[in-house]
Amino acid sequence: MLDIREVLETNEMIEKENLDVRTITLGISLLDCIDSDLDKLNENIYNKITTLAENLVSTGKDIEKEFGIPIVNKRISVTPIALIGAAACKTPDDFVTIAKTLDDAAKKVGINFIGGYSALVSKGMTKADENLIRSIPKALSVTDMVCSSVNLGSTKTGLDMDAIRLMGEMVHEAAYLTKENDSIGCAKLVVFCNAPDDNPFMAGAFHGVTEADAIINVGVSGPGVVKKALETIHGEDFEVLCETIKKTAFKITRVGQLVAKEASERLGIPFGIIDLSLAPTPAVGDSIADIFEEMGLERAGAPGTTAALAMLNDQVKKGGVMASSYVGGLSGAFIPVSEDQGMIRAVNDGALTIEKLEAMTCVCSVGLDMIAIPGDTPATTISGIIADEMAIGMVNQKTTAVRIIPVIGKDVGDTVEFGGLLGYAPVMKVNSFGCADFINRKGRIPAPIHSFKN
């Protein structure tokens, strides 16, 4: 049973160690909004979101005040729009009207972000999928709160290389259309392999078709709490190190469980999952890289970093699973560059490269996240980076993702300021050798042999 005493035990974590509930995300199915008339479809979408989410923000604020737990974001995820708009949308511009409707609905209910401007194309693209993908750059340039994601592959189906090639072009176009704001459109766009249906974190949240009509998912974060806990056992052996991480993750997850249950009961919407992801922020002391340094690495990226991250990720999951029967989403450690002061420091000191980050993604929860690269990087090179990361997910039967930002007008050594939770990022060097002939081949990379488990 959950008890207020469990929250009181975390007071110091909240006040001094940056513990927060990163998001309450309301997942909404839009399947019953489908209509072949575009105007009617948009009306249905707007009405359903604004009705179901009417009290989301106020409920979150009430829980914050009552329990003293910071809830940073209130968000919404919806059914992938490529599915919802297929009957009505004949062109990319038709899909853009839905993006604007989502943005209007998000502003009406007062949330921070709305995710689900998405397509699932792990094996192939329908015409609607392709139209939505081609609409993404414009959609992100004319909206404020819409986030977009595309699933490009899976362990069961392989990689859709045609979609990967197209997404490289779309990332580049999104960067160009938002170049006046340091190409921030790309910060709201992520591509996946093995995307989960219940992830509450942006930019990758969407409401999977296997989910209920509406669901409450909660994302909890606390890298600062883990760092402080490790300081108390400085120099101890690996068994003590692992036990400390696991116990800390348990306590953090219990806070999320309390918030999720309260939000579910007050809104009358079923509880879905807790996502325990150590997601850093630009705040000092809220860094994954600082955890590595406390473990004994001079900088993130030093030899041993991948082993340290694998251990951290595994112990976080073990602690979280013991604290809640419904742990889902991504749950583990995120390694974004721009949102983590320690990671930024490691890049600036020359300890961390894109290649080392790629190696780390074999054992973390997501992938290459919030990485700024030169604006003149070719679209085929972006597609190549995406393909590499998708292959890691496919072969290792895990979720991987890429959220990369080619900042138009910036080069290696420049710094880009995104603001808020997105922070700032040094522009990182990209391998200059080309991969165009590989990327421009047509078709799919087949699923690995170990995918055949039926």
Image (tube, grey):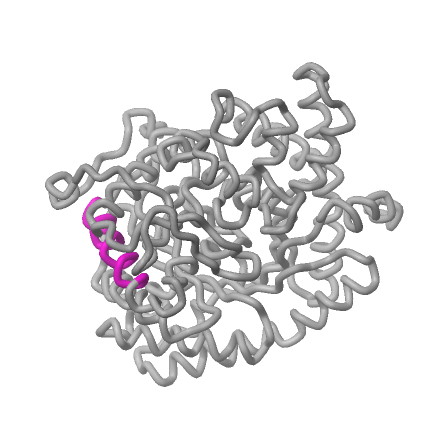
Q: Which one is nearer the viewer's eye here, 239 or 335?
A: 335
Q: Is residue 1 visible?
A: no
Left/right of residue 275 with respect to residue 21 in the rendered view: left
Q: Which residue appears at 61% of the width and 41% of the height?
A: 287
* Membership of 101 in magenta stretch: no
Q: Which residue appears at 26% of the width and 76% of the height?
A: 93
Vertical side of 168 occupied by 158: above or below: above
Q: Which one is nearer the viewer's eye here, 22 or 196?
A: 22
> Image quarter for residue 62?
bottom right
Span colored in magenta = 161-175
Vertical side of 85 occupied by 19: above or below: above
Tally of numbered discs? 0
Left/right of residue 250 with respect to residue 98 in the rendered view: right
Q: Is residue 100 visible?
A: yes
Q: Which residue appears at 66% of the width and 16% of the height?
A: 238
Q: Quadrant of the C terminus?
A: top left
> Residue 447, how many percent across, how many down?
27, 33
* Membership of 163 in magenta stretch: yes
Q: Quadrant of the N terminus?
A: top right
> Residue 355, how many percent across, how many down?
35, 33
> Residue 372, how many percent across, how many down?
38, 50
